[in-house]
Structure formats: C-alpha cells, structure tokens
Image (spheres, helix red, strand yellow):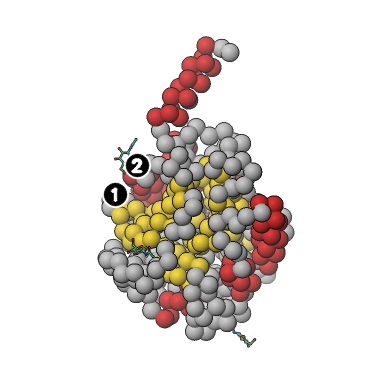
C-alpha cells in the first residue's frame, strides 16, 4: 500500500469513528444507527433552475442550498436524504444543460458524504428536460441510491425499493419504497398545434403490478414481516378526500393552505395539467389499493402541494371514496426550495424509524433551525392533540 493511500485510509477511518455519517462506497447498503434507529431527511420541491438567465434565478438556487445546509447542520445524524420530486423546474431550463442543475441539487450532499434517493416530480419532465437524463446524471454519483426497477415505457423512472439492514445480513429491518407519479410534459415532443405533450400524472398500472409482485416475492423470501415506508411526489386522492373533511390544526398539525390540494390524476373539474385535462377517473385507485394491501407499510410521504405539510391517519372510508383506510399514515413534507410557488418558511420533513417500534417520529426542521409540527405516528395519532403550526 502506498503511503498516500494508507494516509487516506487512516483519514477515512478516523472520519468514520468521529462522525455519524460514514464514508460510503457504492456497494454499501443502508444500515440502522447503533441505537437501532434510521433517520431520513426529505427535501421536496427544491425546483432548481428557474429563470436561470436572470439574476434572481441563480440567487434562488443559492438560497435553496442554504436551506439544505441549515437543515443538515441541525439534523446531523440523518442516514439518508430523500429528494421527493421536483428537483428541477424543467419549464425553465435549456436543452443543452438542463441536467447540470442536478449537480447543484446534490452538491451539499456530496460535500457531506450523505447518500440520497430520489423520486421525480411533474416538473422534472418537460420539453427540455427528461427524468431519464436526470437519472443518468444522478447515476454518476456513488452516493446516489436512485434506481429504475420498472422498465415499462409508461412507468416513469424512479420506481424502486431500498432495504435498510440491522445485524441480520439476510433480512432487512425496513424497506423504503419509491414511486414515480410522472406528470409534466414529454421530452422534446410537441403536438400538431405546437403545444407541449403532457404525461399522465399518476403511478402507472405497470408500477402497481411490479410493486405487488415484488412485495409478495420479498415477503416469501424474508419469511417475516418487514416494516416499510414509501415516497411518491404527487399525493393520492385519499389526501384530497381527507382534506375535504377538514384538517384539524391540533390533531393533524401543519400548514393547510393548498385547499383543495392537487392530487394524482387530478380531481374532476380541477385537473388541468399543462393545458390537458385529466379528469379524475380513479386513476390512482389501483396504487392506493396496493398501498393498503401492503402489510407493515407505516407511512407514505408526498410533496407537490407546497402549502400543505400535515400528516393524517387514513383509518376510515372517506366521503367520495370506495376504498377504506386501514390506519396507513399519509404525510406531506415541507416545501424545501426557493423555487416553485409559495413563501412558507422552507424546511424539510424528518422521519425516524426504530427497530422493534411500531411508532414513527416525524417533524419539520425549518430553515431557521426551529422545529415545526413534531408528531408521533403511534396508536393514538389522529386523536392526540398537538400545538397548532403557525408558519
Ligand atoms: C445553462 O445555459 C444557460 C443559457 O446559456 C445559462 O444561462 C445557464 O447559466 C446555464 N446553466 C448551467 C447550470 O450551466
Ligand atoms: C449535531 O447537531 C446537534 C444539534 O442538533 C449539535 O448539538 C451537535 O453539536 C452537532 N454535531 C456536529 C458534529 O455538528
Ligand atoms: C429549450 O432549449 C432551447 C435551447 O437552449 C431553447 O432555445 C428553448 O427556448 C427551450 N425551450 C423551452 C420550451 O424551454
Ligand atoms: C385547461 O388549460 C387550458 C390552457 O392552459 C385552457 O385553455 C382550458 O380552458 C383549461 N381547461 C379547464 C377545464 O380548466
Ligand atoms: C365506487 O364504486 C361504484 C360501484 O362500483 C362506482 O360506480 C363508483 O364510480 C365508485 N366511485 C369511486 C369514486 O371510485
Ligand atoms: C402517542 O404519542 C403522543 C405524543 O408523544 C402521546 O401523547 C400519546 O400518549 C402516544 N400514544 C400512545 C398510545 O403511546
């Protein structure tokens, strides 16, 4: 071994022993912390690359980087960052360099050697930007854990799962599921009249089929229930149906300013994605059914609606829906980026999973270092009273 290499190895080893974040190799799996917990920080709706030929566009991205750094300074034991959609605002980017913004998004993570996993959002697909190209750019980084496990042409890209291991090398302690809710416009396509060509904005049937098959195969292989959580950019109809019944400021603390919220498939009369009307024909019912059928699935995290960041327990048949919730928790994250609409204080939803513990701890770390909407998704979530969230 060369002296330089041995110094580098020693440095790497000392970094591992003094820092919570290990230096990752591409082949490293996700692992529980020594106390049996696993912590995630979710950044959704970063919207890099807006108005890039102006002064305020790049300034806005610099502010989003500050948000990420501030959150990760406070949440310095996070084990994984989830970029939960709308990493880039594709409407504003140029063909020749649209994926360069991905490098800007992940730069704070690369600097800290924190690995990440993405789902793509509706703004990650547009005439000058494709999710395939973002994925190719992400894949250059050994710290990226984003995968594409569903080759179907209508599936979108970011559909995959990641296992999180404890002591047992054969059976993971948790599974993390990632789904692509598509949306936005197809890359380099124009209609006969010169209009952008919109992509459906819900999780496709091909992905639902892959999910149910893979889930069954994993259940057989592991021979015991492995608890899981899931991430998808656009929320499902259940969140809209719940919001229509009233989000309680104390039982579901969080901002609730996007009302009615925008959901997968768009509700009838509200949906108008880039000029194409997707009336809600229950397009996300198979996806919601598959989520409900997943034993051990604790919670699903979405972004998309920048003005909403509450969690609710889906434990009943909601008005206007045929599916009956079984206690699954559905949560929004906090708008993290300075790009995209809205001026709510930026922040990032934190999630703590603990081995052998049914409960999920979650809160929003705001850019100013404070904590907002800390709740425990336990047996009485939805009945417990918390302080209301004011900003
Ligand atoms: C992309 O190209 C545009 C137009 O030339 C330029 O304004 C912008 O700074 C470039 N962005 C990056 C990230 O290279
Ligand atoms: C990690 O963050 C906590 C507060 O959230 C702080 O007390 C501690 O000093 C930080 N540790 C490092 C190594 O930055
Ligand atoms: C796409 O990029 C090209 C080349 O930079 C640019 O001329 C064009 O305005 C962009 N189109 C859209 C719809 O953003
Ligand atoms: C949808 O949007 C297009 C253009 O943005 C508009 O012309 C059309 O009237 C809208 N349709 C509905 C039903 O809102
Ligand atoms: C509920 O089921 C009934 C009977 O199958 C069907 O007619 C109706 O469209 C469904 N509604 C929704 C919102 O899925
Ligand atoms: C759930 O957590 C809340 C907040 O910590 C607590 O008040 C409540 O008693 C807990 N419920 C159960 C069943 O542990």
Measured in 3D between alpha carbons, the distance from the residue under mark 1 to the one under mark 2, in whole angstroms, is 9 Å
* Residue closest to the eye, 121 or 277: 121
Indicate the quadrant where residue 143 lies.
top right
Q: Is mark 2 within 8 Å of ligand 2?
A: yes
Label 2, residues with CA under 10 Å away: few <14, some 14-19, many ≥20: few
Residue at 37% from the left image edge and 75% from the top image edge: 247
Tally the numbered discs: 2
Residue at 48% from the left image edge and 25% from the top image edge: 12
Q: Is mark 1 within 8 Å of ligand 2?
A: no
Instruction: Please tell me the numbered disc located at residue 369.
Output: 1
* N-term-proximal mark, 1 vs 2: 2
Residue at 57% from the left image edge and 53% from the top image edge: 175
Residue under circle 2? 73
Q: Position of residue 265 (x, y in %)?
A: 57, 73
Residue at 60% from the left image edge and 78% from the top image edge: 282
Label 1, residues with CA under 10 Å away: few <14, some 14-19, many ≥20: some
Q: Quadrant of the C terminus?
A: bottom left
């Amino acid at each position: 071994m060369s002296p330089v290499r041995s110094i580098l190895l020693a440095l790497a080893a000392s970094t591992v022993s003094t820092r919570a974040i290990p230096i990752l190799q591409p082949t490293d799996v996700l692992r529980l912390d020594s106390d049996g917990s696993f912590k995630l920080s979710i950044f959704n709706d970063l919207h890099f690359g807006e108005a890039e030929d102006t002064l305020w566009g790049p300034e806005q991205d610099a502010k989003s980087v500050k948000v990420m750094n501030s959150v990760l300074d406070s949440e310095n034991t996070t084990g994984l960052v989830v970029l939960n959609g709308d990493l880039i605002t594709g409407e504003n980017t140029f063909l020749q360099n649209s994926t360069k913004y991905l490098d800007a998004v992940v730069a704070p993570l690369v600097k800290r050697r924190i690995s990440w996993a993405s789902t793509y959002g509706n703004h990650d697909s547009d005439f000058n930007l494709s999710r395939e190209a973002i994925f190719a750019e992400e894949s250059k980084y050994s710290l990226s854990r984003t995968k594409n496990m569903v080759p179907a042409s209508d599936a979108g890209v970011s559909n995959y799962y990641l296992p999180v291991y404890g002591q047992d090398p054969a059976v993971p302690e948790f599974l993390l599921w990632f789904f692509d809710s598509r949306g936005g416009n197809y890359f380099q396509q124009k209609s006969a009249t010169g209009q952008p060509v919109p992509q459906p904005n819900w999780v496709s049937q091909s992905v639902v089929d892959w999910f149910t098959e893979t889930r069954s195969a994993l259940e057989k292989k592991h021979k015991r229930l492995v608890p899981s959580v899931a991430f998808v950019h656009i929320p499902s109809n259940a969140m809209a149906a719940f919001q229509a019944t009233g989000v309680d400021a104390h039982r579901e603390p969080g901002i609730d300013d996007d009302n009615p919220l925008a959901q997968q498939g768009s509700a009838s009369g509200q949906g108008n994605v880039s000029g194409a009307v997707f009336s809600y024909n229950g397009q996300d019912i198979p996806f919601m059914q598959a989520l409900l059928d997943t034993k051990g699935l604790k919670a699903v995290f979405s972004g998309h609606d920048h003005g909403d960041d509450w969690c609710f327990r889906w434990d009943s048949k909601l008005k206007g829906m045929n599916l009956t919730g079984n206690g699954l928790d559905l949560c929004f994250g906090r708008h993290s980026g300075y790009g995209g609409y809205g001026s709510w204080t930026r922040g990032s939803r934190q999630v703590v999973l603990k081995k052998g513990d049914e409960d999920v701890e979650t809160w929003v770390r705001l850019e100013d270092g404070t904590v907002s909407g800390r709740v425990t998704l336990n047996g009485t979530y939805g009945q417990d009273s918390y302080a209301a969230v004011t900003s």
